[in-house]
Image: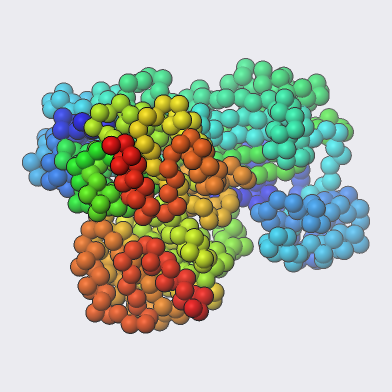
């Protein structure tokens, strides 16, 4: 098994006719992902290397039975694209688009919550999701992954790739690698992923990679303490980040003593997670944790 | 983008929020002429983006031209926690009856907006939250519904303001919410919001942080930006011109990494092994020769830099492509410090092989992030 995306996932790419969308859509398809449709109201009836283009997500769902949408469109139209996907009836939406204004993110999140409570949004500004051997949606470099039993959830894309690589080098495979994104209003939280990994029989341990800003890691720590039986190895980036500056990600900003790396590491450690001091340690600690489980 | 107080007041005025009459001056003569025009008494306020201006002597009351000249002379050029005052805001002095606090921001935990209103303004709201949390009226706002007139009134009535301030405050908070929401701000904060002796409610201070992701739909922000940049770090100005995600710091190890998370992690690792970073720089996914050249050009302007650490994880960007980019960039830029390069991930072996051909005491290959950080710190510290 895997979480959120597996061999039964059928993907529509909103933005398949754009250069980025085509590149990543085809790359995901080449990995074995069922990329069944693209959308573009002006290009309905055409195709991108054999993948049919429909006018809307609704049309694409009807024709192909797709159950997931991968949104890779410019920020100016991304909010509408998310709502179109939800209205079109897909239960899982992955949005990699960066720079969606905060007020739009907050509005879209709350519209989904109110009107489409069974729709899961992953992102925005995330690397996507990879279930090795089954499905890859987004930017994850599948080359460095290995089929296996460790779940990874990360705000940062590159740190997820890095930790995947650390595990793979040790011969430890991954069940699913989820990028929840670096923006202030993520559709899917650490807790959503931790709960799904806890329930997934094929996941034996979880790597959680956070960064400065917000309180999502502290909330995850509470969840780990009360709900997680599987080992969690955590890492937080941004120990040395200057206060009040956005460190590349819109959500990676501390204010006063809130959202600091030190506070997050302390909360996770007290909750029973093993906290790595650098990405290389993630692999070592997970190796130890899995050995203890056995 | 964080606005200066005077920009915040201009921003508020745009959304019809009452603020004191005032203007800016950059020289003492300008300041005195402006004070004369506004009419005494005036308040002269240092424009720096750091707290504690008043305590540092950066906010002064002047009752006549002589005092205005004296204070403007002291404040212009003043160093407040490392921020040099280049501009003062001068406004007519207010007769304050009471000081309140109001703000709107995103509650990241609830994923809704949060309004905070308090009859105890003029002090840090964090202090009020700790010592007397009941003095703050909190309001959760669903972004889909916005702030309705009814909700605004009920909220203001909960805050125990002076009864004569209530109606004006109800109107003001709705305008402030509009400035927050339609204005695309991450934060709007008024501290203090005042009730004057003559019974008017208006914003005596303005703290506004705008969401850079919304800049495309706010061409009017350009005026704010040019001033913010002029007053900023020269390295950051150059980086912005080159389209780089760069933050200047004060250490000796220049940093280039791909991805915001990996870049932050690189800074942390450098510190862990006893060094300090000169900057944060995320060159993103496509680390081609042009981007690497731009990044090295910016870092090269930093006199503190004694070693440059390039930390790349090849994901979709292949390690060999990055290596070629670095080799080309090194030929383009006359570097002030040696490069320590760590390439890992996809095609890392090929990438390292390419760098190997150009290896010298100025171009050094390391296999792991940790070993590269150690090497860079050792070089920077002269060990």
Residue shown at 43% from the left, 32% from the top: A224
Image position, residue A49 (x, y; %)? 9, 45
Quadrant where the image shows the C terminus of chain A: top left
Image position, residue A125 (x, y; %)? 37, 43
Asked where in the image residue B173 lies, by quadrant, the reply is: top right
Q: Is residue B9 above or below residue B349?
A: above
Count of numbered circles in the view: 0
Residue shown at 37% from the left, 82% from the top: B361
Image position, residue B124 (x, y; %)? 73, 40
Q: Nearer the viewer, residue B247 or B22?
A: B247
Q: Is residue B61 above or below residue B133?
A: below
**Residue B276 shown left or right of residue A274 in the figure:** right
Asked where in the image residue A230 lies, by quadrant, the reply is: top left
Image position, residue B118 (x, y; %)? 73, 29
Query: In this rendering, does residue B371 appear at all?
Result: yes
Query: In this rendering, does residue B296 appear at all?
Result: no
Residue shown at 54% from the left, 52% from the top: A245
**Residue B7 shown left or right of residue A81 in the figure:** right
Pick out the residue farthest to the left. Answer: A50
Q: Nearer the viewer, residue A290 or A208?
A: A290
**Residue B142 shown left or right of residue A149 in the figure:** right
Quadrant where the image shows the N terminus of chain A: top left
């Amino acid at each position: 098994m895997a979480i959120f995306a597996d061999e039964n996932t059928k993907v529509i790419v909103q933005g398949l006719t754009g250069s980025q969308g085509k590149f990543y859509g085809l790359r995901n398809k080449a990995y074995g992902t069922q990329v069944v449709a693209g959308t573009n109201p002006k290009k309905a009836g055409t195709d991108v290397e054999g993948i049919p283009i429909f006018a809307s997500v609704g049309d694409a769902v009807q024709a192909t039975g797709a159950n997931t949408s991968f949104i890779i469109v410019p920020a100016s139209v991304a909010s509408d694209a998310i709502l179109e996907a939800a209205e079109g009836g897909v239960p899982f939406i992955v949005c990699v688009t960066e720079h969606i204004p905060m007020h739009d993110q907050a509005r879209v999140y709350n519209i989904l919550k109110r009107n489409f409570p069974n729709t899961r949004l992953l992102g925005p500004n995330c690397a996507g999701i990879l279930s090795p051997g089954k499905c890859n949606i987004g930017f994850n470099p599948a080359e460095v992954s290995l089929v296996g039993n460790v779940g990874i959830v990360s705000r940062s894309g590159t740190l997820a790739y890095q930790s995947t690589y650390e595990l793979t080098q040790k011969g430890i495979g991954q069940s699913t690698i989820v990028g929840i994104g670096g923006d202030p209003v993520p559709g899917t939280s650490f807790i959503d992923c931790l709960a799904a990994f806890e329930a997934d029989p094929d996941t034996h341990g979880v790597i959680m990679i956070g960064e400065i800003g917000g309180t999502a890691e502290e909330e995850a720590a509470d969840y780990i303490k009360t709900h997680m039986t599987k080992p969690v190895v955590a890492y937080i980036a941004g120990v040395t980040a200057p206060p009040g500056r956005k460190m590349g990600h819109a959500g990676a900003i501390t204010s006063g003593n809130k959202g600091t790396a030190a506070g997050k590491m302390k909360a996770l450690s007290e909750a029973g997670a093993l906290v790595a001091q650098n990405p290389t340690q993630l692999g070592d600690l997970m190796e130890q944790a899995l050995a203890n489980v056995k | 983008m964080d606005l200066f107080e005077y920009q915040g007041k201009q921003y508020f005025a745009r959304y019809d929020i009452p603020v004191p009459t005032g203007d800016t001056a950059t020289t003492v003569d300008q300041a005195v002429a402006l004070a004369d025009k506004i009419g005494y008494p005036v308040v002269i306020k240092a424009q720096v983006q750091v707290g504690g201006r008043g305590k540092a002597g950066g906010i002064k009351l002047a009752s006549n031209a002589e005092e205005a000249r004296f204070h403007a002379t002291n404040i212009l050029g003043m160093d407040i926690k490392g921020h040099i005052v280049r501009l003062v805001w001068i406004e007519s002095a207010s007769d304050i009856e009471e000081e309140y606090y109001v703000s709107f921001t995103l509650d990241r935990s609830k994923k809704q907006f949060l309004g905070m209103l308090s009859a105890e303004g003029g002090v840090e709201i964090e202090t009020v939250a700790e010592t007397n949390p009941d003095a703050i009226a909190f309001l959760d706002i669903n972004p889909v519904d916005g702030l309705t007139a009814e909700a605004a009134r009920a909220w203001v009535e909960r805050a125990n303001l002076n009864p004569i301030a209530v109606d004006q405050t109800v109107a003001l908070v709705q305008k402030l919410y509009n400035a927050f929401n339609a204005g695309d701000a991450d934060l709007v904060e008024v501290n203090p919001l005042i009730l004057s002796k003559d019974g008017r409610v208006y914003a005596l201070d303005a703290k506004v942080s705008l969401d850079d992701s919304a800049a495309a739909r706010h061409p009017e922000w350009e005026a704010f930006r040019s001033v913010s940049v002029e007053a900023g770090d020269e390295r950051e100005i150059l980086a912005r011109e080159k389209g780089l995600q760069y933050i200047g710091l004060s250490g000796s190890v220049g940093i280039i990494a791909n991805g915001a998370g990996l870049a932050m992690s690189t800074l942390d690792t450098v510190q862990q092994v006893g060094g300090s970073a000169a900057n944060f720089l995320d060159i993103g996914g496509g680390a081609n020769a042009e981007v690497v050249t731009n990044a090295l050009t910016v870092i090269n302007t930093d006199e503190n830099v004694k070693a440059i650490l390039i930390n790349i994880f090849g994901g979709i960007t292949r390690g060999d492509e990055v290596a070629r980019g670095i080799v080309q960039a090194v030929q383009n830029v006359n570097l002030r410090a040696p490069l320590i390069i760590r390439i890992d991930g996809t095609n890392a072996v090929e990438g390292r092989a390419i760098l190997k051909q150009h290896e010298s005491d100025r171009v050094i290959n390391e296999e792991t992030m940790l070993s590269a950080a150690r090497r860079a710190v050792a070089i920077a510290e002269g060990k």
